[in-house]
Image (cartoon, helix red, strand yellow):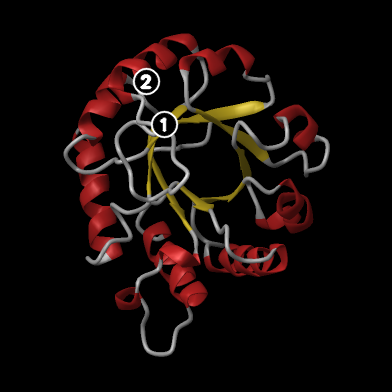
Amino acid sequence: MPNYSTYLVAGPENILPNHQLGNESKEQALIRIVQELSNNGLNVFQLRAKNISDSEQIDILRNLKKALLNTQTKICINDSVNVASKAGDFVDILHLGQSDMHPEKAKSFINDRIKIGLSITKESQTRNIPDCVSYIGVGPIYKTNSKNDAEKPIGETILKQILEKVNIPVVAIGGIDLNNVSNLFSLGVSGVAVISNILNNENPLKNFLLLKEKIKKD
């Protein structure tokens, strides 16, 4: 079973000026940072790039695949069945939201090797998880500023109810930081997905290692 413990979600829009070295583009900086994290044990990287074309996303995925060749990191694409079908061997996971194509239908468009993740934002949605879904991303658990379209936080109580109802890995997302990550793993999540806790004004690798250390202790 894939390891989902440390799961970074990001796109070029999440890259800050202080992340870029020399004349790096945001895309180049993103790939370099993901490679650094992967060399230090990042389990999954999800490309969530809402502001660029499918062909630009595929270019990033192609370059990521080369950069992560000797790592264990799985590459995920957010939402786009079209990108997943065209990117083929560059993608390990397709992550779908509730308003995206139904997972069973999406499965027919993509490589059999590609796993499918599904976002869950409320407990009632656990009744309709197809068998082809390998894990669910649940949240936002806490308040988050990383997604403009984020739902209202569901909190730890609802998360616990969801954990009790499913038998596949659960990755928590939304407002996760060093202060609450222990609670989430004690509740039984398989992993935590982060954006701003890694890609803030500090050093991304330092942030990642602090988070990883916190997870390891629990």
- Residue where numbered disc 1 is placed: 139
Residue 152 location in percent, x, y? 38, 31
| Type of amino acid at the residue the image marks with label 2 | Leu
Q: Tell me whether circle 2 and circle 1 mark residues in contact (CB < 8 Å).
A: yes
Which element is circle 1 on?
loop
- Residue where numbered disc 2 is placed: 159
Residue 9 location in percent, x, y? 45, 51
Which element is circle 2 on?
helix
Q: Quadrant of residue 95?
A: top right
Residue 93 location in percent, x, y? 62, 43
Q: Residue at x 49, y 69 (%)?
A: 31
Q: Residue at x 28, y 28 (%)?
A: 184
* Residue 192: mark: none
Q: Is residue 105 left or right of residue 44?
A: right
How busy is the neighbourhood of tag 2: few (under 14 within 10 Å), some, or many (20 plus)?
many
Tag 1 or tag 2, which sits nearer the N-term?
1
Q: Is residue 165 above or below residue 19?
A: above
Q: Between 58 and 54, which is closer to the camera in this rendering?
A: 54
Q: Which residue is the extreme one toward the bottom?
A: 23
Q: Between 154 and 184, which is closer to the camera in this rendering?
A: 154
